[in-house]
């Protein structure tokens, strides 16, 4: 595929947060922000029990159509994607859905067919695979996931090349290094995707240890990792966070002893 246009200004729309009392993002705010982006991704859709692409909530199909109509009216030429997965989806009862879906040609075909139908009906221009994370046993992964994901994106690219007379976009979200990166065979994925979204945020502080969650050392290491695997810079879109994390220091001595890092109680 051709290299990603420069620059790509991508934003994820957290659809579940619109009603949040402290950080809700209204429809009006979304429309006002749309012209600042070249790409917007609706997060998230899900993988069904039968392997098909399904809405995360019953009202999402209608919301997808409204979303696309509104943002494209505000920003003609804007490219929209439907992101599927996310962190929470690989937890609890749905943790193994990705692995089960990519494991057989039949379930992959169900996903591909439903993806084309869903994107077309919803007015989207592409799909973002946000599997967090293949091959990770703590995330419902299996050792065969890396090969299964390559098979899935190969099937998706073939179907997306001529879907309804147009080419649908295909992207894959990647972790910013660490053990979760081992589940992605980026060298074999790269020929089939338009570009990768590197999640260069929540690198620290999201668990039980404080720290810079967008630390430049971790971001640099992630970019070097993927470039070393053969992905050109033009195919990497670096994700940064429009938020921060703060803590109240209750034991300054312990924090200083840890070099400015402390375990969260």
Image (cartoon, rainbow, N blue to C red):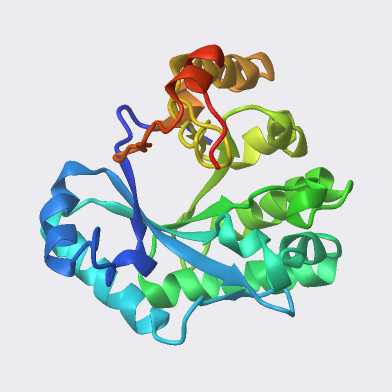
- Identify the residue at horizontal 80%, vertical 46% (top origin): 135
> Is residue 2 or residue 107 the one in the foreground?
107
* Most foreground residue, 169 or 9: 9
User: Where does the C terminus fall, quadrant-wise?
Assistant: top right
Residue at (57% x, 30% y) in the render: 176
Q: How far across and down, in percent of the image, does residue 66 sit?
A: 25, 76
Residue 2 shown left or right of residue 29 in the figure: right
Q: Nearer the viewer, residue 157 or 204?
A: 204
The residue under the point 80% across, 53% down is 141
In x, y percent, where is residue 100?
81, 66
Q: Is residue 244 visible?
A: yes
Locate residue 123 relative to residue 75 in the image: left or right: right
Q: Is residue 219 visible?
A: no
Q: Quadrant of residue 108?
A: bottom right
State which quadrant residue 8 falls in. Answer: top left
Number of marks: 0
Q: Quadrant of the N terminus?
A: top right
x 47%, y 54%: residue: 167
**Residue extending farthest right:** 143
Q: Relative to 259, is 126 above or below?
A: below
**Quick check: 159 left or right of 49?**
left
The x, y position of residue 29, in whole percent, is: 14, 59
Q: Position of residue 179 (x, y in %)?
A: 73, 32
């Amino acid at each position: 595929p051709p290299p990603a246009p420069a620059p790509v200004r991508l934003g994820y729309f957290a659809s579940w947060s619109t009603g949040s009392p402290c950080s809700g993002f209204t429809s009006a705010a979304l429309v006002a922000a749309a012209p600042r982006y070249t790409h917007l991704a609706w997060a998230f859709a899900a993988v069904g029990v039968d392997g098909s692409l399904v809405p995360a909530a019953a009202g999402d199909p209608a919301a997808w159509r409204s979303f696309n109509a509104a943002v494209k009216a505000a920003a003609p030429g804007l490219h929209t994607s439907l992101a599927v997965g996310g962190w929470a989806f690989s937890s609890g009862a749905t943790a193994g859905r990705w692995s089960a879906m990519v494991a057989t040609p039949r379930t992959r075909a169900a996903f591909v067919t439903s993806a084309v139908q869903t994107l077309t009906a919803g007015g989207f221009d592409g799909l973002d695979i946000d599997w967090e994370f293949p091959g990770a046993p703590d995330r419902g992964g299996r050792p065969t996931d890396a090969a299964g994901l390559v098979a899935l994106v190969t099937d998706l690219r073939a179907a997306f090349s001529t879907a309804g007379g147009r080419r649908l976009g295909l992207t894959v979200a990647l972790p910013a290094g660490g053990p979760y990166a081992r589940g992605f065979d980026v060298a074999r994925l790269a020929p089939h995707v338009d570009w990768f979204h590197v999640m260069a945020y929540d690198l620290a502080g999201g668990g039980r240890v404080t720290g810079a969650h967008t630390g430049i050392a971790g971001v640099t290491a992630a970019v070097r990792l993927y470039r070393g695997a053969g992905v050109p810079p033009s195919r990497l879109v670096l994700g940064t966070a429009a938020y921060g994390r703060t803590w109240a220091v209750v034991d300054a001595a312990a924090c200083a002893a840890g070099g400015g890092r402390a375990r969260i109680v």
